[in-house]
């Protein structure tokens, strides 16, 4: 098979052959579990299509959503350096296609090919930094600022469009914003009444991007 992961131009023919010989592409349906927290890390994964939810499992069935993975994202790269088990769970939010590459093959390539590891880690670090910034904002922003952050997160980082459909339930969106479902819905309704957004079911359009960005900045 020909594996569809980026930065092949940084690899030798031998390294490309090793990846192609030790990888497979899997299709997942919406709500399929891709891997569970504390399961062994066997593969590095790359999202070819679709969206996934990455979340930390807590006590009493309470989960904390860390981020949404989308096309072009890697999963498990940072963990493979220091852990043998996944420190979070991953589930498909919609039908998706994911490339699985044997973790030992990637470790061997990383050990010998600094250019390749640099290109991959640059992308992974950007995603990780954005996730950290979003999580840190939960500690100091007021509710309107946190809701604004959620809107911008999906519009700019996930969909690249200011009109989109939420891939999560209202309860899950509230978890991302660090609030209750009722407070999330109330604030979203206030945004709608103020004509900052239009809302129909899960479909949303940010009508005043500048106001949302100002709310996000002021917190």
Image (tube, rainbow, N blue to C red):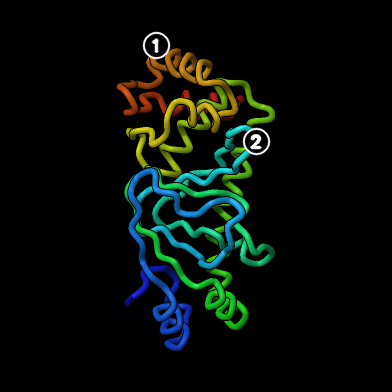
Q: Residue at x 67, y 62 (%)?
A: 83
- Disc 1 secondary structure class: helix
Quadrant where the N terminus lies? bottom left
Residue 218 lies in what quarter of the image? top right
- Left or right of 111: which side holds 12? left
Direction from residue 69 to residue 59 in the image, left or right: right
Please determine whether, in this image, residue 49 is positioned above or below residue 181.
below
In what quadrant of the picture does the C terminus appear?
A: top right
Q: How many marks?
A: 2
Residue 186: x, y in percent?
A: 48, 14
Q: Which one is earlier in the sequence, the residue at label 1 or at label 2? A: 2
Q: Which residue is mark 1?
A: 193
Along the horizontal axis of the image, is 58 left or right of 204? Answer: right
41 lies above or below 95: below
- Residue lying at the far bottom of the rendered structure: 14
Disc 2 secondary structure class:
helix
Name the residue beneath numbered marker 2: 59
Instruction: Identify the residue at image location x=45%, y=83%.
Output: 18
């Amino acid at each position: 098979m020909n594996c569809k992961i980026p930065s092949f131009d940084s690899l030798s023919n031998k390294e490309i052959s090793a990846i192609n010989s030790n990888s497979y592409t899997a299709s997942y349906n919406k709500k399929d579990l891709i891997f569970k927290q504390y399961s062994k890390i066997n593969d590095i994964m790359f999202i070819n299509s679709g969206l996934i939810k990455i979340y930390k499992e807590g006590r009493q069935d309470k989960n904390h959503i860390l981020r949404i993975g989308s096309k072009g994202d890697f999963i498990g790269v940072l963990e493979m350096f220091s852990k043998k088990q996944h420190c979070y769970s991953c589930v498909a939010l919609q039908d998706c296609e994911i490339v699985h590459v044997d973790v030992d093959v990637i470790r061997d390539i990383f050990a010998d090919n600094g250019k390749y590891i640099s290109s991959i880690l640059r992308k992974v670090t950007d995603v990780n930094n954005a996730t950290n910034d979003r999580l840190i904002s939960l500690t100091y922003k007021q509710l309107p600022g946190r809701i604004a952050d959620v809107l911008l997160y999906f519009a700019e980082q996930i969909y690249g469009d200011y009109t989109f459909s939420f891939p999560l339930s209202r309860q899950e969106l509230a978890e991302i914003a660090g609030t209750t479902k009722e407070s999330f819905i109330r604030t979203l309704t206030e945004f709608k009444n103020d004509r900052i957004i239009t809302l129909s079911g899960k479909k949303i359009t940010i009508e005043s991007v500048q106001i949302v960005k100002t709310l996000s900045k002021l917190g």
